[in-house]
Amino acid sequence: MSDERKLTSQAEDFAAWYNEVVLRAELADYSPVRGSMVIRPWGYGIWERMQGALDDMFKATGHENAYFPLLIPMSFIEKEKEHIAGFAPELAVVTHAGGKELEEPLAIRPTSETVILEMYAKWVQSYRDLPILLNQWANVMRWEMRTRLFLRTAEFLWQEGHTAHATEAEAREHTIRMLGVYRTFMEDWIAMPPVTGLKSESEKFAGAVETFGCEALMKDGKALQAGTSHFLGQNFARASGLTFQSEAGTEEYAWSTSWGVSTRLVGGMVMTHGDDAGLIVPPRLAPTQVVVIPIYRNDEERSATEAKAREVEARLRDAGVRVKLDARDHLSPGAKYYEWERKGLPLRVEVGPKDLEKGSLALARRFFPEGEKRKLFLPEGEAIASIPDRLEAMQAALLAAAVARREESSYRGVRDWGEMREILETRGGFVYTGWSGDPAVEERAKEEMKATIRCMPDPEFRSDTAPTRCISGEGEARHEVVWARAY
Amino acid sequence: MSDERKLTSQAEDFAAWYNEVVLRAELADYSPVRGSMVIRPWGYGIWERMQGALDDMFKATGHENAYFPLLIPMSFIEKEKEHIAGFAPELAVVTHAGGKELEEPLAIRPTSETVILEMYAKWVQSYRDLPILLNQWANVMRWEMRTRLFLRTAEFLWQEGHTAHATEAEAREHTIRMLGVYRTFMEDWIAMPPVTGLKSESEKFAGAVETFGCEALMKDGKALQAGTSHFLGQNFARASGLTFQSEAGTEEYAWSTSWGVSTRLVGGMVMTHGDDAGLIVPPRLAPTQVVVIPIYRNDEERSATEAKAREVEARLRDAGVRVKLDARDHLSPGAKYYEWERKGLPLRVEVGPKDLEKGSLALARRFFPEGEKRKLFLPEGEAIASIPDRLEAMQAALLAAAVARREESSYRGVRDWGEMREILETRGGFVYTGWSGDPAVEERAKEEMKATIRCMPDPEFRSDTAPTRCISGEGEARHEVVWARAY
């Protein structure tokens, strides 16, 4: 693919822009298998950083990792009625193995509640064995009709946490705790501030009692469901026979939760921060944060600027910066700038012959405050010393910009159906309204404006004045809800 | 499962001992899916430590991680003739997905050469795009008839490195480099010293030009193939059309390598170090290295010893030790000792009322030099300060013991077929002999003594005097080889 072609602009065609950025930033590529993608090193490196941060947070909240089978007997998935109804259309099924037809077909896991709780039932006897707090990093498969790189693929990578508790209260509390972990992670690492809240019945996980979600606003005004945390009640425990002897000596079903985020988050990062020059990767997620580029016109200059560039690289590495020297000789500096900008690398250090003379360095920032210039020319020592703080400042600025964008695109106190439609059809964003709780209103919105209730927002996101009437015009508002078109 | 039942001894029935240790140390459990296991937190924690160490070593040798599809079209696997012949009997095949029969069946990857090189073919145009050095952490599936926890399961976790190079010499060099990385890892982390060398034609990877292996000796005298590194020549590049324009302007096929280790290594660790009390986990691999156990008879003693135990825990954590306080009140200290010994945790610190009076601590070591006692009573400060060094010393002692065991069970200069059989049938171990290169000799050994050529050992493992005659009695020795019964 030529480096030189311009990207489609976001304004022109956001969907085309997204695909081009993902492909040309080398985050991912189409594979020869329908609906499955290849995650390339730059994309996988970002996912690894997400994994590392989440894994630390899971361990800090008492979880351990484990691994459960990829293949699940169909009879297991069928145990929980709502669950199988929800997932049956998306299953990929192994019917033959080892040269023979299997007696019972095996589904590739679309999620692992059924097999994991079956194991918990084997391990748990008494209340002393609870809670069980496990997480699994795994691939899962959901055979989707229309796929989009990272956002909706047949196979994707994710983590799924599965916990079992002795009491309903503890399980409910854990569901909310993990929703909070997700929110903190999305804010602190992806700089993607979600609205959190309870899903409506029609949008909840198949088999859950309640689903809570993180809804992030993308730059095109559409919502991305970026993570969910489910309170499963005793539904899966009943289906799997997960009982325990309580402290009082009675036999009871355990209460369970599950929660997951996936490689979809990489797509969310792209659509939260990217611009017409390509990707912008928040510094905490960038596999490489700083690239050092020597500039030269002849061999003498090359050896001088490369030596200095190597020195800068070493000093930044010592300062804990993830840094790389780009000494490729067959590319011009301009071609390198273009490539790293498109890949969203946070900061570029240029070392040219004039910089050597002056003892200065040029820093070019991928994201910078409005009104400032992209490039800063600073004395060498000051430039290097300032870089760790600049990266943290960029991380904070990306979050602040995303929060501001979300708030600008949040429409509160909307009371008129036509107004809601006008907003969603022309500007996009989050529309806050009252809702009676009637699913027919959701159906109508889906048909008329392709919008859904993203959630009943948690208290801090609710409007100062609670809506009193349902947006449909019929009935009182039982909830405030957030509407949006969604990925 | 009751904590109190004694393990079968190694001498009595090594295979039964192995299964009991894996289950009762809670490394893994049988799953409801035939041939697939569940890796429990203690086992997965060990695997995570292995992953971390290997991943660092891969990155230090220039590799990046990526992710490729789980499902591979059958037509891809069929492209390389030896490859499909080798893997066809073990494939698990998806025939239905999304409620429909697929036009082309998809195999769950048994390994990913075919799909990965297909992508490389898309990405590589010129010699400047080479080498490509990628690694993937993934699950794979090989439908085995007889399975054993960790050692041979239908689904297993592994890493597979796949590299493509412009020249044969560079690819060969890389194959050997990664074999060396594996050997260093196995020695330094698992304390499991392998013999390395070239595999015979009959034992090489399906589709490789040459396969090199790490062969480790288990405590029952059998060999475990613990890792392999393959020089694939241009075989897979031809099958996938992976060509590049050389510096001279010609169109050429790339040269590729692949190499992998899997969760099988956890089984190797068990059979290298375990004893009749259960597992022994080398300190560098132990998810928790030290457990601190308060001892008390009443509430007053409990609050005093728990407070001290908490202090010891904090000081060890500050010293970089992975430490855990076991404050469970419903278990006696003895039950805790038994549990952690069985799990192979390296070091236990006991804090009792008498220790408080004396200002001392008791250290109980899971593995200790012959002639010493398991428990040491030391002044508190000295005890704590010495623990990091003791852990490193234990790591070194485990390796030394494993090397000594391997050497004691290595029989060199064996010239007589009957002698080889006698050794392999009664004592087990590695038998070094001459070999003419005739595959019929391998066939005969397999039939008569269930033994195979594990490898043609690398120079440093070879006998001082090279054998001159083939062990079969017929023909000259073209190679020195190592025979063993193997897992």
Image (cartoon, coloured by chain):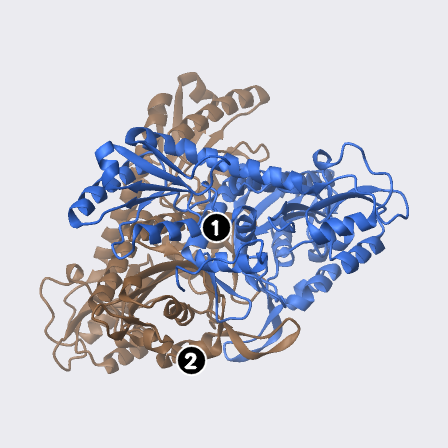
Chain colours: A brown, B blue
Q: Is residue B288 above or below residue A307?
A: below
Query: Camera-side residue: B155 or B43?
Result: B43
Asked if badge 1 and badge 2 are on a common chain, one would say no
Question: At label 2, which amino acid type do we have?
Answer: Glu
Residue A353: where, in percent of width, then height? 48, 21
Mark 2 element type: loop
**Residue B309 relative to residue B481: left or right:** left
Residue A85, position in %: x, y? 39, 80
Q: What is the number of the mark on residue B279?
A: 1
Seen at 79% across and 39% down, the residue is B413
Q: CA distance from mark 1 to mark 2?
A: 38 Å
- What residue is drawn where x is 34% and y is 72%? A242
Would you place residue B417 above or below residue A81 in this image?
Answer: above
Report the residue at 27% width, 43% height from top: A396
Q: Which amino acid type corresponds to the residue marked 1 in the rendered image?
A: Leu
| Image mark 2: chain | A
Q: Residue A453's x, y, as percent?
A: 26, 71
Q: Which mark is residue A471?
A: none
